[in-house]
């Protein structure tokens, strides 16, 4: 099983694609199916969009860990503590829950975690 990987980018919209490409590559390395990799990319994109709304965010951190049956993804922001509360709307949360399992959102720590399980390949 590949080791955990961490990617950190500036908390700016133009860097979200870097996180998505990293997630895609790490998902492929972990043996996820094409559908599961698409789900992982969507989850990273949606979580990034939510994290970009956090005031005073300096960086977005993505940590990806293989679980044996899929990938665990943890995302957070770095920056000054005041004003860091994460706001996540109901639609974005539903998207995350549709593509991942064990979705956890910690607004006070500006942290999102979820799992994407590998689906059987065609």
Image (cartoon, rainbow, N blue to C red):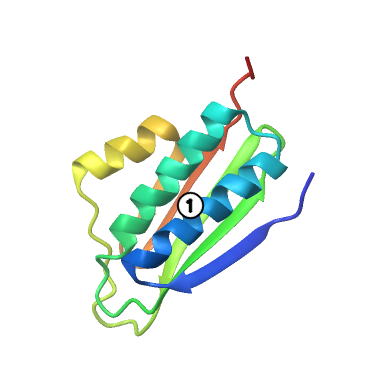
47 versus 70 height, above or below:
below
Can residue 61 be spotted in the picture?
yes
Q: In which quarter of the image is the N terminus?
A: top right
Query: Neighbour class for label 1 at 10 Å: few (<14), some, many (≥20)?
Result: many
**Residue beneath disc 1:** 20
Q: Quadrant of residue 57?
A: bottom left
Q: Is residue 54 left or right of residue 73?
A: left
User: What residue is drawn where x is 27% and y is 83%?
Assistant: 82
Q: In which quarter of the image is residue 98?
A: top left
The answer to which of 99 and 85 lies nearer the viewer is 99
At which x and y percent is residue 50?
Answer: 29, 57
SS class, disc 1: helix
Can residue 103 be spotted in the picture?
no
Q: Quadrant of the C terminus?
A: top right
At which x and y percent is residue 23?
Answer: 55, 50
41 versus 69 height, above or below:
below
At which x and y percent is residue 31?
Answer: 70, 35
The answer to which of 83 and 35 lies nearer the viewer is 35
List the single residue furthest toward the right. Answer: 1
29 versus 50 height, above or below:
above
Q: In this view, does 2 lie to the left or right of 51?
A: right
């Amino acid at each position: 099983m590949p080791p955990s990987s961490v990617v950190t980018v500036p908390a700016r919209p133009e860097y979200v694609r870097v996180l998505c490409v990293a997630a895609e590559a790490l998902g492929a390395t972990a043996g996820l199916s094409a559908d599961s990799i698409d789900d992982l990319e969507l989850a990273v994109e949606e979580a990034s969009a939510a994290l970009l709304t956090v005031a005073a965010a300096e960086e977005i951190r993505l940590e990806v860990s293989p679980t044996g049956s899929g990938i665990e993804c943890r995302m957070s922001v770095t920056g000054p503590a005041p004003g860091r509360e994460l706001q996540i709307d109901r639609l974005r949360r539903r998207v995350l829950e549709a593509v991942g399992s064990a979705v956890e959102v910690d607004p006070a720590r500006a942290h999102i975690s979820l799992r994407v399980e590998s689906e059987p390949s065609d």
